[in-house]
Image (cartoon, rainbow, N blue to C red):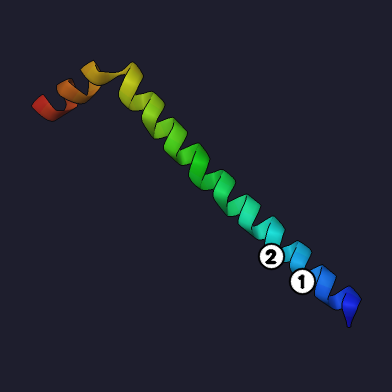
C-alpha cells in the first residue's frame, strides 16, 4: 500500500507542477505582451 500511496503522491505533485508551470507561463507571456507592445493594443482597439 505504501508504494501505491507514494506513486499517487508523486503523480499529484507532478500534475500540480505541470499546471502551475502552464499558468505561470501564460501570465508571464501576457505581462510581456502588455509591456512590450502597448501601441499594437491601441491600434487594434482603434480598428
Total of numbered circles in the picture?
2
Marks 2,1: beta carbons within 8 A: yes
Given residues 34 and 46, the one toward you in this image is 34
Residue under the point 83% across and 69% down: 6
Is residue 32 in view from this perspective?
yes
Is residue 47 in view from this perspective?
no
Q: Is residue 37 found left or right of 11 in the rendered image?
A: left
Residue 2 appears in which quarter of the rendering?
A: bottom right
Q: Is residue 8 above or below residue 37?
A: below
Mark 1, other Cα within 10 Å: few <14 / some 14–19 / many ≥20: few
- Residue that label 2 marks: 12
Query: What's the distance in space between the residues labelled 2 and 1, CA to CA?
Result: 6 Å
Q: Label 2, secondary structure: give it.
A: helix
- Residue that label 1 marks: 8
Q: Is residue 17 found left or right of 6 in the rendered image?
A: left
Residue under the point 70% across and 56% down: 14
Q: Where's the C terminus, which quadrant?
A: top left
Q: Position of residue 24 (x, y in %)?
A: 51, 41
Amino acid at each position: 500500500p505504501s508504494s501505491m500511496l507514494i506513486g499517487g503522491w508523486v503523480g499529484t505533485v507532478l500534475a500540480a507542477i505541470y499546471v502551475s508551470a502552464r499558468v505561470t507561463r501564460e501570465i508571464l507571456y501576457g505581462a510581456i505582451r502588455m509591456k512590450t507592445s502597448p501601441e499594437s493594443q491601441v491600434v487594434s482597439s482603434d480598428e
